Image (tube, rainbow, N blue to C red):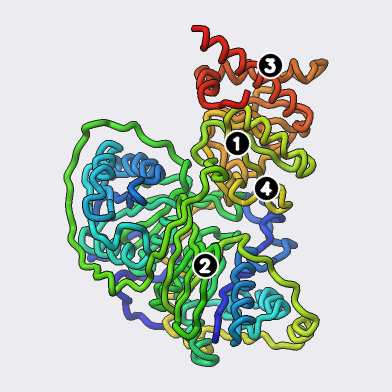
Amino acid sequence: MNDKAPAPAAPAAGGTRASAKKELPDHLKSYKHVWVLVELERGVVHPVSWELMGEGRKLADQLKVDLCGVVLGPPGGTEKAVADCFGYGADVCYVVEHEALSEYRNEPYTVVATELVNKFQPEILLLGATNLGRDLAGSVATTLLTGLTADCTELAVDADGSLAATRPTFGGSLLCTIYTLNYRPQMATMRPRVAAVPVYVPGRTGKIIRHEVSLPEEDIITKILAFLPDATSNKSNLSYADVVVAGGLGMQNGDNFQLVRNLASVLGAEWGGSRPLVQKGWITSDRQIGQTGKTIRPRLYISAGISGAIQHRVGVEGADLIVAINTDKNAPIFDFAHVGIIADATKVLPALTESFRRRLAAASTLSAAE
Amino acid sequence: MHIIVCIKQVPDSAQIRVHPVTNTIMRQGVPTIINPYDLFALEEALRLRDEHGGEVTCVTMGPPMADNALRKCLTYGADRAVLLTDRFFAGSDTLATSYALALLIKKVAENWGEPDLIFCGKQTIDGDTAQVGPGIAKRLKLLQLTYVAKIEEFDLEKREITIHRRAEGGIQVLKTKLPCLVTMLEGTNEMRRGTMGDALRAARSEIITWNAAAAGITELALCGLKGSPTIVKKVYAPSPRAEKAYQIEVEDKSVDQICEALIGEVTKRQPGLEKDLVKTSSDY
């Protein structure tokens, strides 16, 4: 065994870890404040950053520390994002502007994020569980040799001030709460739409800390040749849709899935399905709703022929109103839906589509007459 | 050319059941598979090898029985398979896993040549973290390309690779230098059927099996539970909602009546919704 302490952080001693006393090494005791890495891409902040700001606010208040936004972007391109950080609850904003940060690349972002952490020493660092956040978080945590919990659905501070990060495990069948003991910062990523965007307070301000970095482009090996935006026509916006209609195996076959799309079309809704439908090839994976697919938070969610395994449940629980149609009265979906219909979804959907069509047409005529 | 593919043997999550009383995973009898996302990585590696020549080595860390997954890789056409297995690795989190795999890859490189490319799947279906790929890249000081939807150009002579990377709202076209680590997105290719020759070879082949010492891993304090900064404090089943769904009456009702009742319930519970739908939808 080698007892030499590896830099920069190592556990104080062995022993049974789950019961190990949380005694931070001295050089990590100065780590303070809660940070949220703000995902700024092509001038737009991913909403998950504001969702994290809301969760981060709760953690910071409980720890009685500052909530800080970290904004990386091109020269002159961060002003709006910084103002919004304060509006969504940050006390402090760390800002790094550099040409090399104009668009996300792993190398310069990792260098800058690591440098900021080492210099300003946060105790908690939160990122979105997006392609950007997951790409960056893994690199930063490995560079710092600290703990990282992916895809959290709940963040809390326990009695002694440690971050308790809860995430689904084993495909969503169980939840587990994970701690990072004896290392700082405690890092976690959170999935979009797991938390609500906090109330925006216009005109709220805070302290801005600018940090200069040296990032010569010739030292960055990976080059961006182009950005090909998705065609808007086939882009699914499930995560942020107001109304979502989804089907499961109860739709019986791929042709019947058109009934789900028809209802979605009348409602101006997004549509999706449960995981087995992806495996069967009825829908593509970007339409999958659940733990391994998209998390949704619509005002209305209509599920048709979905049994409601926990993997699905964790992806839809944030919906304001869940309507479930299923033939099996014992289906787990009725344990978390608000309104249920025990019936064959393939029979109900066409009628429901027509009922909604008539109803909306009537309401439209009415509002036009006003 | 030498390509290393990192794979993981995982329980087939579609068949996992949770014990209703103890809330623990019932692993017994659950079949194991190659992590499905890793197959896209393996196929891409095999395709590049077929085009440019060279060898594909599959590696994994896991229990001794993980050699099943590696043997399967050989039947698909991988040239060699190496299993890292030792009790010291038990309980590894993603940081400790990337440490062990990085050293395993170094040892493989010593034996069979430096890799030009390392492939991983985008994530596993049991852990779902997507952290081990970037972790390995960082530990080996390699460039990383994650969520790769397509390899656009691969130039072994110029040592350059151009890829399509899935990003928010579009595709980033990135060019970087070899060697690098690539994590493949799902749906990017279709796994081949192995040839009869590969199947026979796989059945005859020895899976190269190393323990920590054989792989040159001596800093055991960085492995397994000891080398893991995160600990799982609590595992539990989600609590059921207090009340069950309000059921719309269906007995002796026509489907139209059921739908009217449902829409009434929706309007009652989400009062502003109908008005907004009239504005946002145009297809009624």
Q: CA distance from mark 2 to mark 4?
A: 23 Å
Which secondary structure, mark 4?
loop
Badge 3 and badge 2 both on one subunit: yes
Residue at point 32%, 53% (across, down): A124
What residue is disc 2 on? B183
Badge 2 and badge 4 both on one subunit: no
Residue B249, relative to residue B65: is it above or below?
above
Residue A209, relative to residue A359: is it above or below?
below
Q: CA distance from mark 3 to mark 2?
A: 49 Å
The x, y position of residue A205, in whole percent, is 19, 38
Foreground: disc 4 or disc 3: 4
Badge 1 and badge 2 both on one subunit: yes
What residue is disc 1 on? B240
The x, y position of residue A113, in whole percent, is 29, 61
The x, y position of residue A168, in whole percent, is 54, 50
Q: CA distance from mark 1 to mark 4?
A: 29 Å
Residue farthest bottom in this picture: B111
Q: CA distance from mark 1 to mark 2?
A: 37 Å
